Amino acid sequence: MAALELGIDASVAEVPARRGRRLGPLFWMAIVWMIFVFAVAIFADVLPLPSPTDMDMLEKRAPFSAEHWLGTDGLGRDELARVIYGARISLIVGLCAPIIGLTFGGALGILAGYFRGRFESVVVGSMDVLLAFPPLILALAVTAYLGQSILHLTFILGLLGIPAFMRVARAATLTLARREFVIAAQALGATHARILLRELLPNVMLPLFAFFLLAVAITIVAEGSLSFLGLGVPPPISSWGSMIGEGRESLEMAPRLAFIPAIAMFLTVLSFNLVGDTLRALTDPRQGAL
């Protein structure tokens, strides 16, 4: 019996150690890069940078220098300033759009997984219809009707993210809805609202937050793709996607104009993916199954 207790204690003590080993150097490098990107985007106004919209036609495609660390673009605008200010747009859209999906999709998924029945069929069916609608056509339609703006772009991407969040929340709720703590709350006479808010929501939020980080990475790429196609934010506002689109015209003369924002986007998306995958693995209930 003592040996069994010692074995259980040892296995419990190994859980934090195993989780610590999972947070390898790549995870912390991703965290450092994310902090750096957020810091320069937030404090761009106080950094010693030239205006990202000031043009100097005599300095078109100027190389790296002490005055322009990353050179200038085809209109003589400072490339470093444009990359940093472009990070603001990419991060604003990349964070706000998944928040829309998380709020509405998460709420619908929890309600559908808990109440089941006809309500679940209606929610799942409507999400399937939304998934079946071509996202590019939806973006074109909304942009043509409402015009190009950060708000409209965020709304489009947030709407397209609702079905994915609904599926994640519903799957987690279906797993938790018949657990002992939920059954005990029902036996004690707890209302549906109390069970949803006090018992299910805190547990469902863990996988939803992990998926949220992955959705941020996907949204940044989607925003970049739409901006590359001319459906993103209107000029003179720049994002990484629009910078890549403008840089393609100078690939032969100055390929760095496309590669620098592409590298910034790649590292940011990779960082969100690494952190999201790690947190998803840590919050996966199957990982802790005995």
Image (spheres, rainbow, N blue to C red):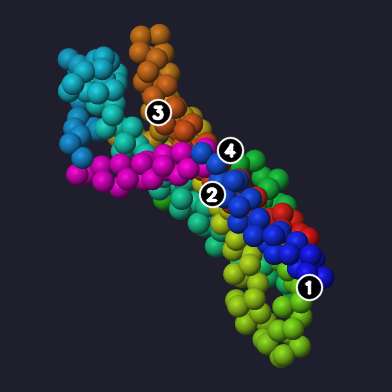
C-alpha separation, residue under disc 4 versus residue under disc 3: 23 Å
Name the one closer to the observer, 111 or 288.
Answer: 288
Quadrant where the C terminus sits is bottom right
- The residue segment tinted magenta is 26-46
Give residue 261's mark.
3
What's the amino acid at mark 1?
A: Arg
Which tag, 4 or 2, sits closer to the chain's start?
Answer: 4
Q: Is mark 4 on a helix, strand or loop?
A: helix
Q: How many labels does the image show?
A: 4
The residue wearing badge 1 is 178
Eyeballing the image, is 130 above or below 174? Answer: above
* In this rendering, position of residue 146 left or right of residue 15: left
C-alpha separation, residue under disc 2 versus residue under disc 1: 28 Å
What's the amino acid at mark 3?
A: Pro
The residue wearing badge 4 is 136
What's the amino acid at mark 2?
A: Leu
